[in-house]
Image (spheres, rainbow, N blue to C red):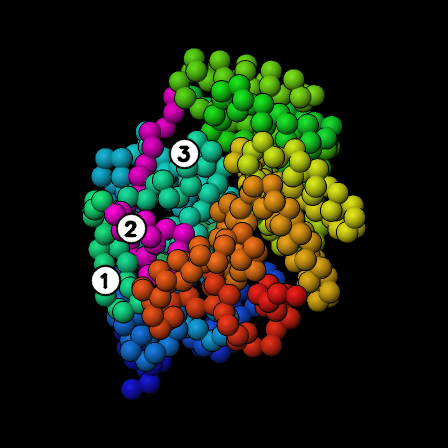
C-alpha cells in the first residue's frame, strides 16, 4: 500500500493533502524562505498521530511537526519535501487540576488563561498568543512580555508526552525523575520528538497590576532607564521598548493607539500586592525621570497601548510587504550600547530598522523590512541582521532569546557556540534520531545544501 493511502486510511481522505492544496504549509512566520512539503497530514487525536508517525517512519520518510506555523526562525518550514504532520486538531484542554492544566499540543496559548479558574493564569505569552500553539511554544521555548518575572515556557512545563523518532511513545507527564526527562524536549524544535500532550503550571493572578508609560528623546536614554529600574531593585512583570520607527508603523495600522511621536517609549507593568505595586510604581517613575524620561498619562488608552505593543510585528505590514525579525539578546547592562550600535548600522547601511522588544530581558527584536520581489533586498536584510547579531554576541549576548534557531540562525549559532558545544548537541540528536527523520535541516548546518538556493546559501554557508 502506498504511504498516502495508508495515511488516508488512518485520518480520512480530507485530512491528507498533496500538491497545491498543501502549499499553505510551505511557509511560516519567517518569510524569507518557502519550502515544499511532499504531503500534509492532519491527525485528529493522539492515537491517530501515533499511527501516522509510525507509518511515515516505516516508509523511511522525514517529518516536520507543525502547530500554528508562526515560527519566526523557519522552524516549521519543510526544506526538502518532508511530510508535514500538523497537530492543530489536537487542541483539547483535558483537565485543570489545582494549579496545573493538561492540554493537547494544538491548543492556542490564549485559551489556557481564558478557560482557567478565575484566580489563575498561564504566564508565558508570546505576542502571537492568540494563535500560536502550546506544542510550538514548548518546542521553541517561547517567551513573551511576562518572561522577565515568570520565565519563558520552560518554567511552566511540568511534563510532556512524546512520540520518539523510533515510533515509541514516552509518557513523561507525571515523571518526576531526577534527570527531568521532559526538559530535553523544550526548545528542541521538534527534532527529538513530537509533543502530543503537556502538563503545564498556572500562576495565581496578582492582587494588583499597574502600568507606567514613559517617553524619551533618545533610545539610548530609554535603554539606560531600563538598567536603572532593575538597579533600584524592581522586577517588573513586563518592560517593553518601542522606538520611533515601530510607532510610525503601528500608527498606520489597525493597532493605531495615538501613541506619542517620540524617539522611544517604555511600557512597564508591575504586579503584586496593592501596597507593593504602589511603592514600586514610585521607584520606577523616579528611575525613568533620572534618565531624562517623561512619565505620560495614557488618558484611558492603557489597554490600547499594550495592544499596540502586541500588534507591533503585524503592523509592519502597513509599511512594508515583508521583514525579518531578529531575536538576539544582550545582557541588560549592554542595552544602551546595543541600541547605539543598531542606530549606527541603520545609518551606515541606509536601512530602515524598527525596534520593539522585551527590554527587561535585553531581548532585542530589530525588524528589517525588505522587498520580497527583489532578491538583493532580502539578502541585504539578512546580511544586516547577521551584523547586528554578531555585535550582540560580542557584547556577551546570545543569537536567540526566544524564536529558536530553525533554518534562520544556523550560521550565527556556529559563531556563538564552540565546536565542543555543537558536538554535544549533535550527539543528543544522534541518540534520539539516528536516521535524522524528525525536522531534519534545522538547528545544525547540514554537510550539503539540499538544493541550490541563494537564501539557504546565505543562511548556512560561510563566505
Ligand atoms: C506576530 C508574531 C509575534 C510573535 N511574538 C513572539 C513573542 O513575543 N515571543 C516568542 O517567543 N515568539 C513569538 N513569535 C514566534 C512564534 O509565535 C513562536 O515561536 C510560537 O511558539 C510558535 O508556535 P506555533 O504553534 O506557531 O509553532 P510552529 O511555527 O508550528 O512550530 C514551531 C516549531 O515547533 C515545532 N513543533 C510545533 N508543534 C510541535 C509539537 N507538537 N511537537 C514537536 N514539535 C513541534 C515545529 O517543528 C517548529 O520547529 C511571534 C510570531 C509572530 C508571527
Residue at screen point 59% across, 63% down = 459
Rendered position, 127 above or below 229: below
Q: Which mark is residue 150?
A: 3
The quarter of the picture where the C terminus appears is bottom right
- Whole-angstrom CA distance, mark 3 to mark 1, is 30 Å
The residue tagged 2 is 182
Is 243 left, or right, of 129 in this rendering?
right
Report the mark closest to the observer, 3 or 2: 2
Q: Are marks 3 and 2 in contact (CB under 8 Å)?
A: no
Q: Which residues are magenta?
A: 179-207
Q: Secondary structure at mark 3?
A: helix
Q: Residues within 10 Å of mark 2 (few under 14, many from 20)?
A: many
Report the mark closest to the observer, 1 or 2: 2
Rendered position, 273 above or below 432: above
Residue 278 place in picture, x, y as percent: 48, 14
Q: Earlier in the sequence, mark 3 or mark 2?
A: 3
Does residue 126 belong to the magenta stretch?
Answer: no
Amino acid at each position: 500500500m502506498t504511504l498516502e493511502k495508508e495515511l488516508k486510511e488512518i485520518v480520512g481522505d480530507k485530512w491528507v493533502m498533496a500538491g497545491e492544496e498543501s502549499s499553505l504549509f510551505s511557509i511560516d512566520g519567517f518569510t524569507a524562505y518557502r519550502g515544499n512539503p511532499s504531503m500534509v497530514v492532519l491527525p485528529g487525536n493522539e492515537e491517530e498521530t501515533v499511527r501516522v508517525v509510525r507509518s511515515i517512519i516505516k516508509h523511511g520518510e522525514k517529518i516536520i511537526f507543525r502547530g500554528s506555523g508562526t515560527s519566526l526562525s523557519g522552524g516549521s518550514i519543510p526544506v526538502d519535501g518532508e511530510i508535514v504532520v500538523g497537530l492543530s486538531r489536537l487542541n483539547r484542554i483535558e483537565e485543570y487540576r489545582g494549579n496545573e492544566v493538561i492540554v493537547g499540543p494544538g491548543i492556542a496559548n490564549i485559551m489556557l488563561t481564558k478557560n482557567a479558574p478565575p484566580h489563575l493564569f498561564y504566564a508565558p505569552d508570546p505576542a502571537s498568543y492568540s494563535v500560536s500553539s502550546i506544542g510550538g511554544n514548548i518546542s521553541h521555548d517561547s517567551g513573551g512580555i511576562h518572561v522577565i518575572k515568570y520565565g519563558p515556557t520552560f518554567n511552566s512545563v511540568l511534563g510532556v508526552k512524546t512520540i520518539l523518532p523510533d515510533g515509541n511513545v514516552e509518557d513523561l507527564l507525571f515523571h518526576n525523575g531526577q534527570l527531568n526527562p521532559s526538559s530535553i524536549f523544550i526548545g528542541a524544535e521538534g527534532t527529538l520528538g513530537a509533543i502530543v500532550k503537556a502538563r503545564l503550571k498556572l500562576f495565581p493572578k496578582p492582587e494588583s497590576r499597574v502600568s507606567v508609560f514613559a517617553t524619551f528623546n533618545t533610545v539610548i536614554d530609554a535603554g539606560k532607564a531600563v538598567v536603572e529600574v532593575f538597579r533600584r531593585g524592581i522586577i517588573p512583570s513586563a518592560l517593553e521598548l518601542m522606538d520611533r520607527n515601530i510607532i510610525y508603523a503601528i500608527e498606520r495600522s489597525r493597532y493605531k493607539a495615538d501613541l506619542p511621536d517620540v524617539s522611544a517609549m517604555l511600557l512597564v507593568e508591575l504586579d503584586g500586592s496593592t501596597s507593593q505595586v504602589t511603592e514600586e510604581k514610585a521607584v520606577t517613575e523616579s528611575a525613568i525621570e533620572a534618565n531624562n524620561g517623561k512619565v505620560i498619562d495614557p488618558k484611558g488608552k492603557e489597554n490600547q497601548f499594550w495592544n499596540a505593543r502586541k500588534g507591533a510585528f503585524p503592523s509592519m505590514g502597513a509599511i512594508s510587504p515583508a521583514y525579518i525579525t531578529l531575536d538576539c539578546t544582550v545582557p541588560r547592562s549592554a542595552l544602551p550600547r546595543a541600541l547605539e550600535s543598531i542606530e549606527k548600522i541603520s545609518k551606515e547601511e541606509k536601512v530602515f530598522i524598527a525596534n520593539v522588544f522585551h527590554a527587561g530581558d535585553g531581548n532585542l527584536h530589530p525588524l528589517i523590512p525588505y522587498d520580497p520581489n527583489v532578491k538583493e533586498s532580502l539578502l541585504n536584510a539578512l546580511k544586516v541582521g547577521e551584523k547586528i547579531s554578531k555585535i550582540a554576541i560580542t557584547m556577551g549576548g546570545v543569537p536567540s532569546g526566544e524564536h529558536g534557531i530553525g533554518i534562520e540562525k544556523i550560521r550565527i549559532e556556529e559563531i556563538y557556540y564552540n565546536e565542543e558545544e555543537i558536538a554535544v548537541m549533535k550527539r543528543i540528536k544522534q541518540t534520539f534520531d539516528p536516521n535524522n527523520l524528525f525536522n531534519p535541516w534545522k538547528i545544525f548546518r547540514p554537510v550539503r545544501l539540499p538544493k541550490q538556493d541563494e537564501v539557504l546559501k546565505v543562511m548556512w554557508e560561510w563566505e
